[in-house]
Image (spheres, rainbow, N blue to C red):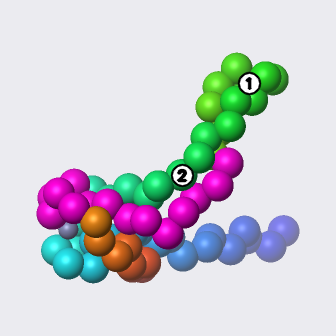
Amino acid sequence: MAEPKEEPKLRMVCEECGSTDVMRDAWAVWDIETQDWVLGAVFDYGHCDRCGRETNIEESLL
Ligand SMILES: [Zn+2]
């Protein structure tokens, strides 16, 4: 059997300070089946907790 190939993992970091304490603006939609909010749409607005303000979020390989 072929070994499953692992996808390289990414992390999202703040462009300004490199912190991973970053968030994106998003919508959650209610899922009746799971009785929980699930991610609907993700927007471009990024926020860094360390900088305490809007930032650009960059992808970085682990
Ligand atoms: Zn930052």
Q: Tell me, yes or no, whether the highlighted magenta stretch contains residue 13.
A: no
**Which quadrant of the structure image shows residue 18?**
bottom left
- Residue under circle 1? 34
Q: Position of residue 30 (x, y in %)?
A: 70, 30
Q: Position of residue 10 (x, y in %)?
A: 47, 71
Total numbered badges shown on the rendered structure: 2
Whether residue 40 is visible: yes
Q: Where is residue 8 in the image (x, y as percent from the top left)?
A: 54, 76
Q: Which mark is residue 26?
A: 2
Q: For the stretch drawn in magenta, what is the main secondary structure?
A: strand
Q: Tell me, yes or no, whether the highlighted magenta stretch contains residue 44.
A: yes
- Magenta segment, which residues? 40-53
Q: In which of the image's four quarters is ligand 1 placed? A: bottom left
Q: Which of 27 and 10 is in front in this view?
A: 27
10 Å crowding of disc 2: few (<14), some (14-19), many (20+): some
Q: Quick one: label 2 or label 1, which is nearer the N terminus? A: 2
Secondary structure found at label 2:
strand
The residue at 67%/48% (across/down) is: 40
Q: Position of residue 39 (x, y in %)?
A: 63, 45
